């Protein structure tokens, strides 16, 4: 017996799921968010960057930004970390509930409740395994095109494969984006084929599992091929326009607008579903639409930022001759004489004109206040060897990406081993704002 197709009851997860003024506002928000990390840990940076790149399938996240090491590490494969964000458990429980509450009882009326729940767990695991394989297809295609992938993460809206840099050629982006839907299509055909071939030999419930996984993978292919950013179809369309026009920014603007339209359509459909009685599914589609809307917008901002900063040496915008502190200074004096008087949240640490590390305000906060007088800067600072540093001639956009990778709001700039300046997100923000004001 083949399951009856009842769309409204399926537990589906939406996987894959003046410009200068806009860019200036965006980077200002990113900088302010980084400042909040002093008081709130990493959550603000994570929230800011989760929607910056390519949405549910694979984002242009750099190293340890969105969902920064939060959750479980399932393992590694060829230096690619496989992670499970805590938010994934929310969607897993929801998928299991929808399957056990609607799909199996309505299609297999004689099925016992225990069997329905057991098969629902199995189906949900196979479903998320399909998403993981989808992301692996992106990752392997990227590796084949010399684009490094740092990790693959499953989260509430699906999965993402995090690239350390954007593809530099349109053809590479097209291949990388297309690999995921191709994998899902193959999985869909495989499971549907198994459901038909094995139908006479297996229990109806297990047949339903195979049928559902095949069916949902085909639906995900259709969803992912919608030609709007950040979905795979949008990235493939962008690659095609980019290839023929030679203009990445224009191509991104087109598919970003299409992605925003699609996001509004999803939210509208979600509202209709809610009024039709499907509260949970409707809410899911609304949130997916909101997620895609922000991803579509920020995907364009990121490209505009990339063009605005590329080719600008960081030495042109860094802060030179920064205030420094000696490693033997107590934390009490550091707070009273440096943080309060200078209003900076970070200071280079110098010993005999040699740069030895950085001390930040959150490192001071980690120490009990009654111990500040007896604790030295050298006890809490980040030593030079543990810091990421850049050179004055490093591209400003690359430096911004390194900041995100390091989870830091600033990086020391060294030339011939000597400290010549500090570059911060604030410096980059001000540079972009000045260029905007001057119209350059």
Image (spheres, rainbow, N blue to C red):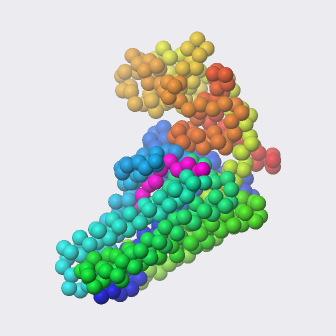
- For this rendering, which residue is in front, 185 or 117? 185
Q: Is residue 345 above or below residue 64?
A: above
User: Where in the figure is residue 374, as x and y percent of width and height?
Assistant: 39, 16
Magenta span contains residue 114: no
Residue at point 46% right, 33% down?
362
User: Where in the figure is residue 388, as x and y percent of width and height?
Assistant: 56, 32
In the rendered image, the quadrant that contains the N terminus is: bottom left
In the image, is 270 to the left or to the right of 438? left
In the image, is 415 to the left or to the right of 219? right
User: Where in the figure is residue 170, as x and y percent of width and height?
Assistant: 68, 60
In the image, is 91 to the left or to the right of 204? right
User: Where in the figure is residue 275, as x and y percent of width and height?
Assistant: 43, 81
Residue at point 53% right, 39% down?
406
Residue at point 28% right, 72% down?
120
- For this rendering, which residue is in front, 361 or 399? 399
- For this rendering, which residue is in front, 21 or 186? 186
Q: State which region is magenta.
A: 146-157
Q: Is residue 431 above or below residue 277?
A: above
Magenta span contains residue 155: yes
Regarding residue 49, the answer to whether it shows in the image is no
Residue at point 64% right, 70% down?
258
- State how many labels appear: 0
In the displayed orientation, state which residue is furthest to the top.
Answer: 352
Regarding residue 150, the answer to whether it shows in the image is yes
């Amino acid at each position: 017996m083949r399951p009856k197709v009842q769309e409204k009851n399926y537990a589906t997860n939406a996987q894959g799921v003046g410009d200068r003024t806009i860019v200036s506002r965006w980077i200002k928000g990113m900088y302010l968010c980084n400042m909040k990390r002093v008081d709130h840990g990493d959550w603000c940076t994570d929230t800011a960057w989760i929607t910056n790149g390519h949405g549910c399938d694979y984002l242009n996240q750099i190293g340890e930004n969105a969902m920064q090491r939060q959750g479980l590490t399932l393992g590694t494969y060829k230096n690619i970390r496989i992670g499970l964000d805590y938010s994934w458990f929310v969607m897993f429980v929801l998928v299991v509930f929808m399957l056990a509450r609607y799909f199996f009882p309505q299609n297999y009326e004689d099925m016992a409740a225990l069997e329905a729940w057991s098969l629902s767990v199995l189906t949900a695991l196979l479903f998320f395994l399909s998403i993981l394989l989808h992301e692996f297809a992106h990752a392997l295609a990227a590796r084949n095109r010399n684009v490094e992938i740092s990790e693959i993460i499953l989260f509430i809206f699906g999965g993402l494969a995090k690239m350390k840099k954007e593809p530099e050629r349109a053809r590479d982006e097209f291949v990388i984006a297309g690999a995921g839907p191709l994998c899902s299509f193959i999985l869909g055909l495989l499971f549907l084929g198994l459901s038909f071939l094995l139908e006479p030999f297996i229990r109806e419930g297990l047949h339903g599992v195979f049928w559902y996984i095949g069916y949902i993978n085909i639906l995900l292919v259709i969803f992912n091929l919608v030609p709007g950013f950040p979905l795979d179809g949008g990235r493939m369309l962008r690659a095609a326009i980019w290839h023929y026009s030679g203009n990445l920014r224009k191509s991104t603007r087109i598919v970003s607008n299409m992605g925003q339209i699609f996001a509004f359509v999803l939210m509208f459909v979600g509202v209709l579903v809610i009024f039709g009685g499907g509260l949970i599914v409707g809410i899911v589609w609304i949130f997916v639409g909101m997620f895609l809307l922000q991803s579509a917008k920020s995907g364009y901002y990121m490209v505009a930022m990339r063009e605005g900063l590329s080719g600008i040496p960081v030495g042109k915008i860094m802060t030179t001759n920064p205030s420094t502190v000696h490693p033997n200074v107590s934390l009490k004096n550091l707070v009273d004489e440096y943080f309060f008087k200078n209003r900076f949240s970070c200071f280079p640490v110098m010993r005999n004109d040699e740069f030895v590390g950085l001390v930040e305000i959150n490192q001071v906060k980690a120490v009990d206040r009654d111990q500040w007088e007896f604790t030295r800067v050298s006890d809490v600072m980040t030593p030079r060897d543990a810091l990421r540093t850049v050179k004055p001639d490093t591209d400003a956009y690359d430096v911004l990406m390194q900041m995100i990778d390091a989870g830091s709001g600033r990086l020391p700039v060294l030339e011939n081993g000597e400290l010549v300046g500090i570059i911060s997100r604030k410096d980059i923000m001000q540079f972009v704002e000045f260029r905007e004001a001057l119209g350059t």
